[in-house]
Image (cartoon, grey):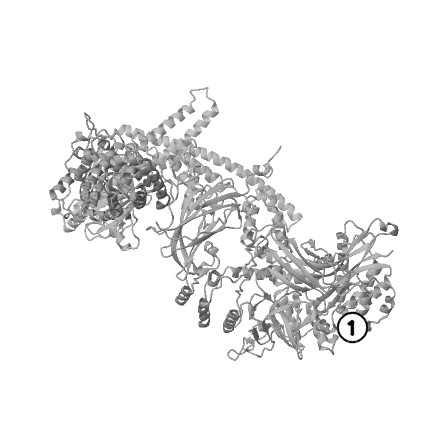
Amino acid sequence: MVSENPHLGDQQEPMQEDSDTRPLSITSRRGPRSLPPIPSASRTGFAEFSMRERMREKLQAARSKAESTLLQEIPTPRPRRLQSPNKRELETEFGTEVRKAGEEVQRTQQDDFQSYSRVKFRDSVQKIKPKLPVPPGFPSAEEAYNFFTFNFDPEPEESQEKPKAKTRAGTNQEEEEGEEEEPPAQGERRTDEEELLSAKDEEDFLLGLDHAAEDFIAVRPAEYESVHVRLQMERELLFVPSRVTVPTYKKLPENVQPRFLEDEGLYIGARPEVPRTCQNTMENRLLTQEPGRKWFGDDGRILALPNPTKAFPSRPPVLTQAQDIKAELETLYKKAVKYVHRSQHMIGSGDPPGNFQLDIDISGLIFTHHPCFSREHVLAAKLAQLYDQYLARQQRNKAKFLTDKLQALRNAVQTGMNPAKPHKSLDTTQKAINEYKSEIRQTRKLRDTEQEKDRTLLKTIIKVWKEMKSLREFQRFTNTPLKLVLRKEKVDREADEAAYEAEIQAEISELLEEHREEYEQKMEAYRAAYQQWKAWKKAQRAKKKKKKQEHPVEEHPDEGLEEPYPGEEPVKPVPPEPTDQALVEQQVRERAARSRRRPGEPTLVPELSLAGSITPNEQCPRVEVLRREDVKRRSIYIKVIFNDKEVSRTDSRPLGADFRVHFGQIFNLQIFNWPESLTLQVYETVGHTGTTLLAEVFLPIPETTVVTGRAPIEEVEFSSNQHVTLDHEGVGSGVPFSFEADGSNQLILMTSGKVSNSVAWAIGENGIPLIPPLSQQNIGFRSALKRADAISSIGTSGLTDLKKLAKWAAESKLDPNDPNNAPLMQLISVATSGESYVPDFFRLEQLQQEFNFVSDEELNRSKRFRLLCLRSQEVPEFRNYKQIPAYDREILEKVFQDYEKRLRDRNIIETKDHIDTHRAIVAKYLQQVRESVINRFLIAKHHFLLSDLVVEEEVPNISILGLSLFKLAEQKRPLRPRRKGRKKVTAQNLSDGDIKVLVNIIRAYDIPVRKPTASKFQQPSRSSRTFSEKRAASPTTHSPTHSVDYPLGQVLVRPFVEVSFQRTICHTTTAEGPNPSWNEELELPFRAPNGDYSTTSLQSVKDDVFINIFDEVLYDVLEDDRERGSGIHTRIERHWLGSVKIPFSTIYFQAKIDGTFKIDIPPVLLGYSKERSLIIERGFDSVRSLSEGSYITLFITIEPQLVPGESVREKFDSQEDEKLLQATEKFQTECALKFPHRQCLTTVTDISGKTVFVTRYLKPLNPPQELLDACPNSPQATAELVARYVSLIPFLPDTVSFASICDLWSTSDQFLDLLAGDEEEHAVLLCNYFLSLGKKAWLMMGSAIPEGPTAYVLTREQSHYLIWNPCTGHFYGQFDTFCPLKSVGCLIGPDNIWFNIQRYDSPLRINFDVTKPKLWKSFFSRSLPYPGLSSVQPEELIYQRTDKAAAAELQDRIEKILKEKIMDWRPRHLTRWNRYCTSALRHFLPVLERSRGEDVEDDHRAELLKQLGDYRFSGFPLHMPYSELKPLIEAVYSTGVHNIDVPNVEFALAVYIHPYPKNVLSVWIYVASLIRNR
Amino acid sequence: PWSFPGAPSLAMTAAGPSVFLLMVNGQVESAQFPEYDDLYCKYCFVYGQDWAPTAGLEEGISQITSKSQDVRRVLVWNFPIDVTFKSTNPYGWPQIVLSVYGPDVFGNDVVRGYGAVHVPFSPGRHKRTIPMFVPESTSKLQKFTSWFMGRRPEYTDPKVVAQGEGREVTRVRSQGFVTLLFNVVTKDMRKLGYDTGPPDTQGTSGPSPPQGIPR
């Protein structure tokens, strides 16, 4: 033993190695262990570490014990060797953490076994079964480790070499492992088994060990293992299971008979197929293991699940090999499955659908005529027919019956005449006798005809027989076996004669009586008639006399009226003649002789027999032989047609010589429905050539009572219309032939015959007739379709039938209670009750009515349906209607009110909103234009181009390709900051309150400041100044004097900003001074009209955001100076200074508005003046001279950001040249490539929706002469006046009027007619005026604030350019910093378009010289010269002078309305109007108009002060173009004048309208509040 | 006498419901795009004017998934859908529109398929396999450049695949399938007179066989 320390050091290393490989060793023996897993993160980490720790501890503790054990053993590097196979298995085996722990124990066990199994291993190998006794001292873990450590005593180098040398041992082991694959599974939870297995392992180890012991000798011979030894060894090691079949008893427990479940009737699945030998091997192997029998079932076979493999592949066929499918597919014959028809015709759903059966018995066929008939046959057929008739008559014997009846009646009359029974009343007797007599008459007549018929029939029979006999004699052969025998029956002549005579006498007497009665009746009638005639004659005579006296002329017309017998003139009646007895007798006798057997004449009874012999063929002439042969060649069969479908056919039977065919076949038809038709088709086959349809026989469908067995054989006749001519004795069909030699008396016979058949319902097994239910019959099936419309669905043939049927049913007096008649009665009731009316029209969609679930009226009444219809028609009111309620009752009537009102008002011109009629007409016209454009657009919207649907990159040209390639090479700059866009919201799911308008008020410049409170001494000097002085005096010159007025430290102005939007008002805090800075954010909620947040709806919002600037003024209201010490009483007043108005649509389209805007300050602001040049130096002042005014810096946006509606690409048709259009597209794309954000406009849409080239809009147009005359000397003044005129035309954005549709350009005359338009129209008109004034002018497309993309006008003066805002009339120099136009996209002249290709687009930095192609890209150039496009503008504009009276009237009305409004806005205060002030203001407004709002303040103020001396006055004039009333009201409201609530306030309001030509009105509103100074 | 705040008033419930509800949940399960990998998908619902979503997400974008390594080569997203609609009218029944995107050889994100299917009408569990398609380039040259530039033709709005209007101007190529699983629950449909369920009151039917080409 060496010292501990090196030991430890040594040990740790191998151990470490070992722990790496440990999981592998485990896997070789997969015995389940129940050791808890060691949770370890990594194999070599924690597990290894803990192992070492444990080892170290245990090493110490168990050293002594281990030493003693070790001494007995040969120290071996066993564990080392164990590693070798494990290492080898590294790739394939898998180890788990659990195993790792288990392995530890296992190893100890192994090693422990090693120690004692050496002694016993021979035993253990030899006996496989016996248990290996568990050693008493089963080693504990400590011992195991101990042992383990000692194994490593040998030199590490050696032990490392060892594995390589011992590969054989390794392979050996591997084999063993292979063997052991099965047993571990067997030994679940059986430690015994495990031990056994481990012991087996040991053998191997021990064997290896023996050799290993020699390894300690340094020099040794080459290792050799004799074959013998090896075999021996293997025999001991290896178990080779035998292939011999194991006898059953071995596999079963003792004394148990095998039990075969299958024989007991239990199901046993098919076992998987395993070769017999494999099975035997397996069985043998299992038996050698301990609990081997548990693997065997009761039948002594290995337990096995049924074969899981499917017999067929479940993989679907590969589709690509389509051609192979056919080959692979196997067609399977499947018997046709009966389609159980859910009888469509069935109504009574209670009737069970079943199989019904109709038996058709076709017994035979007889031809009454056939083309092959010889003449004799024809006669024979005739004879047979007659004889049949005779027999039938004889059977009925009608004549006899009638004779008897007659006799009985006569007797009755006799007894009635001689009343033997006196109790009968005379009346009834007489009546009965009369009835009898009439019956006798009837019966006699019938009897006579019957007797006559009998007689003639007999005569005919005899005649035909005679003919036949003569024919036979003539042709010298006999064809038919017919033979007629007449049997004479003797009669008693005497009795016969007496009876005959008696009969005649009776008849005569009766007749005479009859005649007598008749004569009497006639006499009676004659007498009555004669009387009448006489009376008439008399009256006639009297009248004639009368008339002749009075009105000889008017005789005739009156005659008819006064006649007792209106109508014709009665004839004089003729008296009837009495009957002649002799004549009657003669008649009777004649008749009797004709119809009756003479007395004494024997009765003839014909008897037809087939006893005659037919002449054999040899004796017949050739033609007859041919005929007979022809007959033989023919055969007949019959097809059974059921419901127009062939269901079966009979065998083909040869035609007999007697022209009879016997079939005798019964067909059973299995049916589901009541049969509609049943037909037999008779076919004839001649030889082998052809089959011809001879005839169709229609069979009646049997009554429900007719069942098989009870049905009589019926003969149904048929006939064919075929024409056959034969070249032999046969007479043919349809061709004339004659019996006479001379060919006279021709006959034409058609093929005809009789089919004897019977049709009956079959009887089922249980005796129930298989008849379809009654309801399914004809009637039922018809009414099932549709009660009301049955006829139209069946067709006209059914209709006629029905009519006839009803008629017949009514006439035939059917018993309505007979169940047999029930369906018929039902039909009749339906037909007669009118429920089924007979339409006399044809309907294309017969069943449409069936699909209507409500009537049309009801559907039209439905509000929901109406709403749905209107929405789908895209009616504007309903286009975006969401969630149409599910029920009518939830739809309010008012939903439709607007729509209906609009429809009503379409043609009514509403003057209420517009006051002046012209504008009302214009508004109406605009509305109509809008509608038509919208309709056009809606149609165009449904027409798509590829680019509407698919985004596709253009094919790039080389420069762009190069650019993009360059971009690829560009350095990526991940740190480059990018502005992140706000999230955009689609407007679909928004509701009220979701959208807010954010207004950020930043600062303002140059707010007007208060003037010092009026100092009385200054006034006179002011007021004395003349009007002309004012112009001359520059405001700047006043400034110094003003400044003097300001006391030091006094607040100049205290402005605050109030933002109002949709009547919601927010205001900022109050700032101080003329250049205030607020920097406040105001939030205003936004409500969409009708809660509709769709894009189209939002685009059409017309609301404006008003930004008003007020001055907050504090007034001391303390009236008593003594209280000043104790309290402050001030009143806050606010004075309106100006406003900025921004339409919501602008905000919506721009998403944000950011900039400095000019405040719209009224021209006269009493009490305020611009604080100017006080601080500013003069030099700078001159620069700003053009831009005087106040400015405010704002930022407005919508939160959340809304996605603006895409501007719809105009898809309208055009009348422009196709080349030009292509050029415009090219131009635009080129421009867009270079400067995608610059506006480039080449084509626009005109008001009728057509695309027009834009230059066509520009053309010199004359401005109103009135304006030209105003300042004839100053072109600049004229230009300004014209610009003002244009700006006075109201502004109406296209997007509002044509919501989201497109930009429509109207021509200038249309614009002036409409008196509304947006920037383009204003700009076009202004440009055209300038052109006509001789200026060089262009339309300038660009973007400005706040409008966004807009149109301005550029003019070129002598040395500089001027930019005109057409909507305000203001103009700016090119270098004016306050010019609202911020970028220029293109210039449009009357003959060309120039696109700005300069680097900058701000008007300050660009050159407007369009002749430079480097700066301006022109549309028409040398390559595409200007083609000289005609203008769309009119030749000349015609201006009507506006009616001044109408303007004055409008002025009064506006004033009145505004006053009312102000009073309405002050519901809690009294509103007093200062009439004096109002009139003063009214006089002042025209002055303002004349001066165009320029500074007239001072004079005005002075004047006012003079007039209203002791009033504190606050007010201002508002100026705007007139469009309609609403904007005016809004503007007045926004000033907040009405908000003053000082108790003694008075108001003044004056309106002035200045008419310009063409109904352009300039409106001035002066609104003021006055407070009396105390 | 008393009622819960927020509960529908008694009068309203007595009068019967005025809307019906359609709850759809399920998932965009997987896709088969034999030629492409690393795809993600977007879904959104298209529905008529009478429909309004009441709960859940009507749009979604999934993670990027790679092909499975086994032979099936499926792209599994298992991306949940859960949305509830209310409506008064079955017209405009919701459709789910799927669009699948993924990188092309140059790494550009291009569209790999569009598809749409109606949400099943009847309550229960439904599996749908939607064949997908993409718009084709108008010419060979376009095709090449779009391939080269990585800007394949795309629909301006994926929702066009849920409508029939204007489709006649496009040409598409089909590629791939997406499998969707829907669990549909409806409420008050029958009360409003719309019967979409199976005739018996069992309510659910077994998973219907997937449509289209067998997988």
Note whether A870 is above or below A533 in the view shown.
Answer: below
Choose top left, top right, bottom left or bottom right for residue A715: top left
* Residue A865 in view here: yes
A1570 with respect to A698 (left or right): right
Note whether A1420 is above or below A411 in the view shown.
Answer: below
**Residue A934: image location, x then y, percent:** 57, 60
| Residue picked out by circle 1 | A1034
**Residue A14: image location, x then y, percent:** 29, 45
A260 with respect to A1401 (left or right): left
Note whether A565 is above or below A1417 in the view shown.
Answer: above
B172 with respect to A1500 (left or right): left
Q: Nearer the viewer, residue B132 or A659?
A: B132
Q: Kindly identify the amino acid type of the residue bearing the numbered disc 1.
A: Ser
Q: Nearer the viewer, residue A253 or A170?
A: A170
Q: Nearer the viewer, residue A989 or A1345?
A: A1345
Q: What's the chain of the residue with tag 1?
A: A
